[in-house]
Image (tube, grey):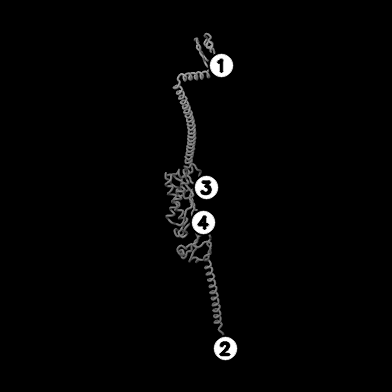
Amino acid sequence: MATTPVNTHNDEIGEGTVALVKTTKLMILMLRIAIAVLLIAYILSGFFYVEPTEYALVLRFGKISGTAGEEIVESGSWQWAWPKPIGEVVRIPKKTQSLSTDYFYFNDEYLGGPESKPALSADAGPLVTGTDGYLLTKDENILHAKWGITYDIVDPVTYYTSQTDANATIRRIFESTILKRIARTAIDQALYADPDDLRKKVKKDTLKAFEELNIGIKVKFVNFGESTPPRTSVLAFHEVQKSEHIKQTLILEAETYRSTTVQSAKGLAKQRQAEANAYASELIASVQAEAQYFNQLLEQYQAKPDIAIRNLISITRQHVMQNAEKILLPAAPGEIRIRLNRIKPTVINAATATGSSNHQPH
């Protein structure tokens, strides 16, 4: 009886297939687990927290999701949105933003930085085209200046949708308004007369430009920083400023002298007027008293002329004798009767005074 040989090759093929199938199933299981983990991680990555100091907009396929007026995600809360590439979260700061520009200032980097910039003198060197920035004033002078702006984002949706690069857009608008305003301003007004007035005008122009373009921001403050004429002419400008300062000082001194002189003249005029008024009052009172006295004399004279005349003669003699230190009597013979003041009874002999014969007064 013959025996049938065992097919070991087929057995090896069967075992290899089984092992391959098991390995494939294991790989598929691991792949499924990896996909599930990645899916869970992808879904979990969609959770985000909105800080109280920021706005948040949720994009879906590049467009802002949410109904009109409700696009802004509530601040201070956890939210979920589809992660990239389906969705994206755009964060916009609430706090005040600041932006500065030295586009109109001379560049000192190519000279080794601010520490190595040329001195302010006639040998400082010319402006380098394409490197140094500047402004052209109304009176065709060159002005270098640094500017700054602070602003708030008041409409996040408009802010995000109105431009692709917000900072670049704001910077260009701001620099454009500066350029236009300086072109209508003389350099002495910008540098010396009233720099704050220029700053306010630039702010007004910037506000108007942003309102017209409607990019969702509101300007709070415009800063007019460091400013100077070209390095080669700054010393000449300093001399002009010095002369202007001397001029203003002299004008102030002249105004002070004028004010002091006017006040002194007014005070003197009031004094003279008061003295004149007092003299006028005194003179009027004296004239009125004299008039009253003469009216009384007139009444006495009209009533008794002889007695009135004798009284006047007596009063006149008494008045003369009271104030006389010497009395001269005529040398001719005759008798003169004089009523003398008892305080001064001494009478000088007329003969002694004149060298004539003695005549005793009575």
Q: Distance between the residues labelled 2 and 4?
A: 95 Å
Secondary element at image label 4? loop
The percent coordinates of residue 110 (x first, y second) are: 50, 49
Q: Is residue 324 left or right of residue 184?
A: right
The answer to whether the residue labelled 3 contacts the one labelled 2, judged by CB atoms less than 8 Å apart, is no
User: Distance from label 3 to label 2 (Cα)?
Assistant: 105 Å
Residue linked to disc 4: 95
Q: Nearer the viewer, residue 175 or 23?
A: 175
Callout 4 environment at 10 Å: few (<14), some (14 to 19), or many (20+)? few
Q: The residue under label 1 is which amino acid type? A: Pro
Neighbor class of circle 1 (other Cα within 10 Å; few <14, some 14-19, many 20+) is few
Which numbered tag is attached to residue 345? 1
Q: Which of marks 4 and 1 is nearer the N terminus?
A: 4
Look at label 4 and name its amino acid: Lys
Of marks 3 and 4, which one's residue comes earlier in the chain?
A: 4
| Tally of numbered tags | 4
Q: Which amino acid does label 3 sit on?
A: Pro
Single out the mark in the foreground, 3 or 2.
3
Q: What element carries label 1?
A: loop
In contact (CB < 8 Å): disc 3 and disc 4 = no
Q: Mark 2 points at which residue?
A: 3
Q: Residue furthest top?
A: 357
Residue of label 3: 114
